[in-house]
Amino acid sequence: MADLPIHTIVFEILTRLPAKDVGRSKSVCKQWYALLSTQDFVRIHCSRSLVSSNQRVLLIDDLTCSVRLIISKSNDYGPSSIVTFPFHHQNNDVSILSHLNGLLCVCLNHTYELLLWNPTTTAFKRLSTPDSHGFYINNLDAVGLYVDDDDDYKVLHIKRRSGVLGVYVYSREVDSWRNIPFITREEYLSPHFNWSAGTFCGGTLYFTVCECWLGGTKRVICFDVNSEQFKEISFPPVPSIGMVQGVLVNVKNELHMFASTCMFEMTIDLWTLQGDYWIKFLSCPPIPTISLSFWCDITHYVTNGNWFVMTKLGKLFTIEMDMKPFECFYPVSWFRGFKGAVFVQTIVSPSI
């Protein structure tokens, strides 16, 4: 260590600081400000921040927006800190659509505008343009946030409107949208198919595409973020009787899917993608009968054997099972009604 240049020692120390401490350190001197603002520093700091202890839960209700620490050992959240939105909104009408490396892609429901927002640094960037790009319609559109090999953060926006069916990519680097071809079945762009939000894993953005929950076509659409080519793969071989839901999650850079099936007694299996094929990883016991008015969505799970399922009205069911293969908390990509997200505290900026 004594032989290392002082610049290298300082760099190594600062890249291990919490994100908020990095922000405060920028005011120490001009040299530190310049160092902490470089893309190399941001990239390395981000890679070292992607640990379970640095995860937070952002929860939005009608009155407040708060950030809470995740306490995985007790299956609970820590004390909350109130977050003030840095952008104009109406009654917290903010939907969280996608998240990656501390950035959230959100929609302002009263204007339909898309934004990139870092709740840790409070920085944000509006993605809407005068030529109608960057406007999101719930239940018709789908978005996914990703980063390519050139470290450029991008948003894939699949627009499904009357007379306007297309796929667009926003680049943080050039601050603009462009159209790309959608090389797969055109019918997937029709409103008859329900698209999930995109889940980024291993250089690919994945979407579930379902014709309807009660039967019909169910596929997974894959978007290679570097070649910008689409392909489709099969859904896990789950029974098609009753409701079928698939929730994608990135676990240690491997794609997994929680697949829930049946109508009155829900069963949930965890599948992992190997190549283009799904392998069943584990199953949970059937959940006791739940009224359809309380139909559940998978939220998240932790390592001590508790798996949580949330009803439409917010009630939590806990499933006890053996989760020993996992050693930290893993979130899925969304909460019921897009009113929350699990994110990592970083200094990644929504703009260059």
Image: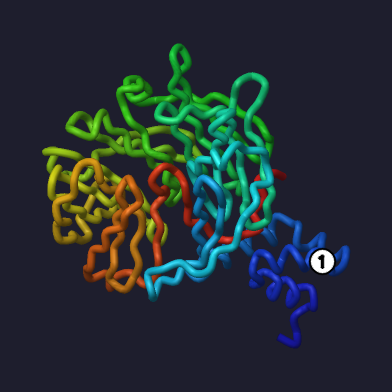
Residue located at (54% from left, 38% from top) = 93
Task: Please name the residue shown 40% across and 49% down the image.
Answer: 335
Residue type, label 1: Trp
Residue 192: x %, y % from top left: 30, 23
Q: Secondary structure at mark 1?
A: helix
Please report the residue visible at 36 percent of the width from the left and 58 percent of the height from the top: 300
Q: Is residue 284 left or right of residue 315?
A: left
Count of numbered labels shown in the rendering: 1
Vertical placement of residue 2 versus 166, above or below: below
Please, which residue is most extreme toward the top here? 163
Of all residues, the one furthest to the bottom in this rendering is 2
Residue 284 shown left or right of residue 177 in the figure: left
Determine the image quadrant of residue 197. Answer: top left
Considering depth in this image, is 1 or 39 the residue closer to the camera? 39
Instruction: Indicate how the structure is coloured in the image.
Output: rainbow
Q: Residues within 10 Å of mark 1 (few under 14, many from 20)?
A: some
Q: From the viewer's perspective, is 231 left or right of 37?
A: left
Q: Give percent across and percent down for residue 142.
A: 44, 33
Residue on which the image places disc 1: 32
* Farthest right residue in view: 30
Q: Position of residue 260 (x, y in %)?
A: 22, 48
Q: Position of residue 243 (x, y in %)?
A: 19, 39
Q: Is residue 159 above or below residue 48?
A: above
Splitting the image into 4 quarters, where does residue 185 fall? top left
Q: Can residue 208 be seen?
A: yes
> In the depicted view, which residue is nearer to us: 245 or 157?
245
Q: Is residue 131 above or below residue 196?
A: above
Residue 273 visible, this angle: no
The quarter of the picture where the C terminus appears is top right
Viewport quadrant of the N terminus: bottom right
